[in-house]
Image (cartoon, coloured by chain):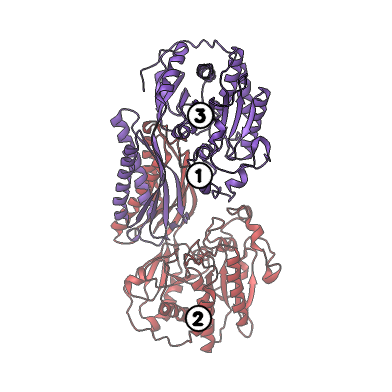
Chain colours: A red, B purple
């Protein structure tokens, strides 16, 4: 993280932000749960289709040409005159959410991109390159269990043969829901699989996203730039014991996998807290947020408990050490409990370093409006990380999150910070489009 | 628990047990999961219907008259000549199982009752009173969440107005599935609700059941009699925290209810183990076997975790102290974790003392064949407990379980012990029927 940004008044010059407010208001009700206020924009659901319809309508109103690949990813193009189709700049994000997620994660990047086009046109900017606004499919992985599914398919980071057999909790196959309702519109009907050619050799991908921690809030800065994405992954810890009657089985006779799981969840937390304290801030994360119990009956000692460990650290080595430590403690406890443990790595993503040249260029441009812009690591996976790994020069702009809360109905960004984000994105795109 | 039984050879005199073996073989395949070897005889399911069809066919073959109440409970009557319908003896058990349960829990009592009729007839016993073989519906509560549902409805222990709105995980209503497929047969088509008059003022209910602990195995005895059912109940512990992103939320900033749950599950186990050690054997049981996580996503700190505590102890006071202690530790930890805790008692069943006069009479009779029969408390709920609470003089005969494992595919009883159980039940019924 770089030094604190100079706190200066936001002038909001160089762009009418009324269109952003209108875009945001129109999107806000779609997929919102009336009870929690959270969002249920689950990949390829009716709610996501409605968000996409909003996007297509807004893009068409701006004379942007919409394309779609076989993976459900959308692209809306603003092409220069005289027309040029390649070596453009891509921006955008995603419109899906985790179950009961917040309004900003993903959607803010898409709405800001549309608003940034309005700002650039108001400024009379005549782009020398195409600008593509991307909406990546199923970024959260809430439906098919693979995070950044759309961008991973686009870049070939996931084998289409593996993706084609993915199915959701109700048994629906990815291949069947991707095109549902689109027919041949925008190029739908293609096969699942690599489609990076759709981006046409971009010189940069710039994704605006709400920050999902409190880094900018602590620094008093409305926007920031990303340095890296931490290494992260998911490990399945399956504890097996002996299913038995909860009433008649003596405590001393049990082999209860719930106990081994419970101790492991506490140990994981303790280990990551220690790493955090040693680092004086961001050291590591370890979370058991998903648990499956067999048979999950109130009157039965479980046969098996499976917990999913989400672990993250600044480097791939550090995350492996973290998981190894937790694994060792779990194994020791399993011996005491008479249970057995199987650990399976489900996905392990190495750390991503965003393009330093691109970051320095954008930092220099943004300094004119924002002063010294903080540069932060992020612990969250993003489509930007997938594109960076595929070789696209990539940058991320973060918008301040006053509480750091995300993946929750309480996720929030102040309207003025969102507007600052639109101007920052417009400035960054102008920097890249006109030269 | 009384002193150890004299270990003596089982003579297997006084009855041809071939019919028991045939009954058991015919029932064994119904509802068995080919992968686990466990049983999925879930209340009112097709598998239970098939078990009931087996029962009705076997009863009819024995000229027993089958009746059915409005709650799905079946009764097969052997009436004396000259005919008498009241002040009979009831035996039986249930045919449903927990998901992936064992073959013996419930079914052994029903098959043994049919075989005992054969034994009594071979002996030339002419009953002075009717004998009714009962099959109680949904004893395990696996489908509608209420244990001993059939016997509770029969005795009025559960309000029919509460039962009529019960629904299963798929939304099917109890009222709609009870009569499904029976039309008006055996008195089907009646309303849910009290039906104790169907038993016609019995002088005794005697239920044979596989033991669900290792009491008889430790004593080297093939059969035993029940003294009491422990007080037991279910308490819902709901831990609420703050849903958040598993990657970006610093460890120190979390309010993670999974931690409070995990510590509580460990504390409950420790507290019950301590009570057990202090009692030098059976002191208390505490189990968290069912957990629900919201939103149960791998990359989200949970919003809430709900665990169901199954707690049991010899007396109602002791179980309340156990739950209070666990509650206090959970509350203390919640303060540390920044979470909140709500505890709701879902069902609390006081201890049941079985009729001592009936037990002594049966013990005296069984001593002729088995010597001194052990008398054990049970920690499991049974239809016998419901009938005892409703004022029916009640006894239970347990059959040795060599490992104590129950509610699991590994539940087992040796064939010779099952045959000893049939003879014990025949002896007990003869004792009660001829005087």
Give the camera-side residue of B280 and B192: B192
Pair 2/3: label in front = 3
Give the total number of marks visible in the rendering: 3
* Residue, disc 1: B145
For residue A183, side relative to residue A109 (left or right)? right
* Residue, disc 3: B411
- The crowd level at tag 1 (other Cα within 10 Å; few <14, some 14-19, many 20+) is some
SS under mark 1: loop
- The answer to which quarter of the image holds residue B40 is top right
Q: Badge 2 sits on which subunit?
A: A
Q: Badge 1 sits on which subunit?
A: B
Residue B401 visible (yes or no): no
* Residue, disc 2: A20
- The answer to which quarter of the image holds residue B125 is top right
Residue placed farthest to the right in the image?
A: A184
Which percent across, then down, holds residue B295? 47, 56
CA gap between label 1 and label 2 equals 51 Å
Pair 1/2: label in front = 1
Q: Badge 3 sits on which subunit?
A: B
CA gap between label 3 and label 1 equals 22 Å
Q: Confirm or deny contact between disc 1 and disc 2 (CB under 8 A).
A: no
């Amino acid at each position: 993280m770089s030094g604190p940004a100079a706190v200066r008044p936001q002038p909001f010059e160089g762009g009418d932000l009324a269109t952003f407010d209108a875009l945001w208001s129109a999107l806000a009700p779609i997929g919102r749960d009336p009870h929690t206020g959270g969002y249920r924009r689950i990949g390829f659901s009716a709610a996501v289709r409605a968000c996409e319809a909003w996007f297509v309508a807004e893009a068409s109103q701006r004379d942007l040409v919409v394309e779609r690949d076989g993976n459900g990813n959308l692209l809306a193009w603003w092409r220069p005159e005289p027309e040029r189709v390649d070596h453009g700049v891509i921006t955008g994000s995603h419109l899906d959410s985790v179950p009961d997620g917040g309004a900003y994660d993903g959607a803010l990047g898409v709405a800001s991109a549309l608003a940034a086009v309005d700002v650039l046109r108001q400024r009379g900017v005549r782009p020398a390159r195409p600008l593509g606004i991307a909406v990546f499919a199923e970024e959260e992985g809430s439906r098919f269990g693979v995070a950044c599914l759309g961008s991973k398919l686009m870049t070939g980071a996931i084998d289409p043969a593996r993706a084609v057999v993915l199915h959701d909790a109700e048994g629906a196959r990815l291949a069947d829901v991707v095109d549902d309702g689109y027919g041949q519109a925008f190029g739908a009907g293609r096969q699942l699989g690599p489609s990076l050619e759709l981006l046409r050799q971009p010189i940069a991908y710039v994704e605006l996203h709400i920050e999902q921690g409190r880094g900018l809030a602590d620094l008093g800065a409305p926007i920031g730039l990303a340095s890296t994405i931490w290494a992260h992954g998911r490990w399945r810890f399956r504890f097996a014991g002996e299913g038995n009657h909860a009433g008649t089985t003596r405590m001393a006779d049990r082999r209860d996998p719930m106990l081994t799981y419970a101790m492991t969840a506490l140990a994981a937390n303790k280990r990551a807290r220690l790493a955090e304290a040693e680092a004086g801030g961001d050291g590591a994360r370890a979370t058991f947020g998903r648990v499956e119990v067999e048979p999950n009956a109130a009157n039965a000692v479980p046969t098996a408990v499976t917990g999913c460990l989400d672990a993250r650290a600044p480097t791939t080595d550090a995350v492996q050490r973290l998981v190894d430590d937790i694994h060792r403690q779990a194994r020791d406890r399993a011996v005491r409990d008479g249970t057995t443990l199987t650990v399976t790595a489900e996905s392990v993503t190495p750390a991503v370093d965003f393009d330093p040249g691109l970051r320095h260029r954008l930092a220099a441009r943004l300094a004119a409006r924002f002063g010294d812009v903080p540069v932060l690591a992020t612990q969250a996976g993003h489509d930007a990380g997938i594109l960076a790994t595929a070789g696209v020069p990539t940058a991320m702009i973060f918008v301040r999150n006053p509480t750091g809360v995300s993946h929750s109905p309480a996720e929030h960004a102040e309207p003025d910070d969102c507007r600052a984000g639109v101007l920052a994105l417009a400035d960054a795109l102008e920097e890249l489009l006109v030269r």
